[in-house]
Amino acid sequence: MASPMADDALLTAEDLHLSFGPTPALSSASLRVHAGEVLALMGPSGSGKSTLLHCLAGILSPDSGRVRFDGHDLSAMSDARRSALRRTEFGFVFQFGQLVPELSCLENVALPLRLAGVGRRQAQRSAAEWLDRLEVADVAGKRPGQASGGQGQRVAVARALVTRPRVIFADEPTGALDSLNGERVMRLFTAAAQQTGAAVVLVTHEARVAAYSDREAVVRDGRVREQEYVR
Amino acid sequence: MCIVIGMSVGFALLGLLESGPRHGYDLKRFYDERFGHGRALHYGQVYSTLARLLKNGLVEVESEPGDGPERKRYAITSAGVTDVAGWLAQPEKPEPYLQSTLYTKVVLALLTGRDAADLLDGQRAEHLRLMRELTRRKSDGDLADQLICDHALFHLEADLRWLELTAARLDQLADQVRP
Ligand SMILES: Nc1ncnc2c1ncn2[C@@H]1O[C@H](COP(=O)(O)OP(=O)(O)OP(=O)(O)O)[C@@H](O)[C@H]1O
Ligand SMILES: [Mg+2]
């Protein structure tokens, strides 16, 4: 569905095709993500949601088609430039295993800032603020393994937001949580993203999680049916 | 509730006629097989519905020799086709017992060669719209609001799961409903 405001999209996928060997994962997938919106990607298992997310984030390169972020074609960039973009403009939240188990929750959240060259004290101060906003200040000194699943996901959201990226990619961020904890993560996540103006691309198969989005797109057989964007 | 069911019987009969003209008794049998779910339509209801559709110009009659309503063959008019299309494209307001109306719509879309997946996606969007509204209300509300909204949200979620399951089985269903 072509939007009349097509050109103000921050991130776009145009006619993406991607196969894993003989298996087509994306066949003419197109999508627009607008600045600051929360977009839910729904659709059956195996339909291509994660593959699309990875293409949008520059983790996978499509066989054909184009992904543009802020007007720049991702596939025309050097690998170094693309990974710099991922570090500075994008944030990631996955279902499991994204926190470094040897570091405390506070150090995990501070890590992206440290990698970006921020001093230790400043990084830890920002990290503590983000943990507080996501209501997990009490696990700051604990290792991820000592936090509950819901707390761990909120730490992961804090880590994704701490560098103030423009897009956060979240693949089933509540997939391993019960509905009460899942909703708490979503409520805090979407509120925090709204505060920083980050767009969120959220893959979920749960309607109650998708209800925290502004708009949904349904992926089916590697193609996207996108609900119209209205500002 | 009764009015809603009555209206959807009218659309269902009309949609069935779109797949070809039929006699009243034949149409009733066709309906009962697909949508009766163990509760057959009364002849009286079929003929009064057909009379209303006829009066509104949505069907026309091809008469055959002999008298009596059972001799009449009904055919859909182009105004009738437009009505069916409009009904199928309009998502239903989310409410209890929705699935029987939706099932009817999906079967008719398949029977008349329309895009049933599109219809289900339109309904999903309508459900999610209401779920977003309830989710917002829940975040602003007190515990009582939260519990009431959650109840509605769980029901809407169940509907949505049914929509998804139906979407996944469309090919299978199409094989079964096509005569
Ligand atoms: N690394 C891979 N190697 C081979 N095939 C893959 C790979 N990743 C995905 N696929 C295939 O591509 C298709 C799309 O997969 P994808 O993971 O994008 O689906 P999905 O919509 O995220 O599913 P789910 O809801 O189960 O996570 C599937 O057929 C899958 O088997
Ligand atoms: Mg996936």
Image: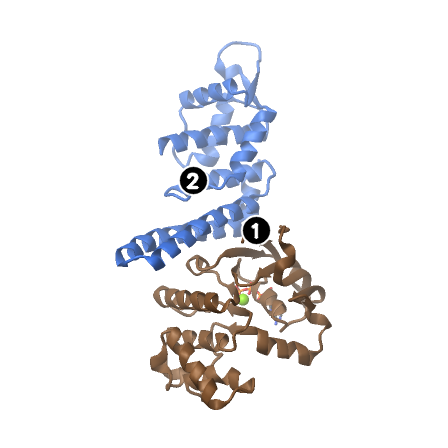
Q: Residue at x 41, y 79 (%)?
A: A129
Q: Is residue B132 visible?
A: yes
Queried on whether the Cβ of the residue with tag 2 lies below 8 angstroms from ligand 1, the answer reads no
Colour blue belongs to chain = B
Q: Residue at x 51, y 25 (%)?
A: B26
Q: Is residue B178 visible?
A: no
Please tell me which residue lies in front, A164 or A188.
A164
Q: Colour of chain A?
A: brown
Residue at mark 1: A228
Q: Amino acid at mark 2?
A: Ser
Q: Are marks 1 and 2 in contact (CB under 8 Å)?
A: no
| Residue B151: mark in rendering | none
The residue carrying pointer 2 sits among few (fewer than 14), some (14 to 19) or many (20 or more) residues within 10 Å by Cα, namely: some
Please tell me which residue lies in front, B108 or A118.
A118
Q: Position of residue A208 (x, y in %)?
A: 41, 58
The residue carrying pointer 1 sits among few (fewer than 14), some (14 to 19) or many (20 or more) residues within 10 Å by Cα, namely: some
Residue at mark 2: B100
Q: Residue at x 35, y 34 (%)?
A: B1
| Quarter of the figure with residue A224 | bottom right
Q: Residue furthest top?
A: B66
Quadrant position of the C terminus of chain B in the picture: top right
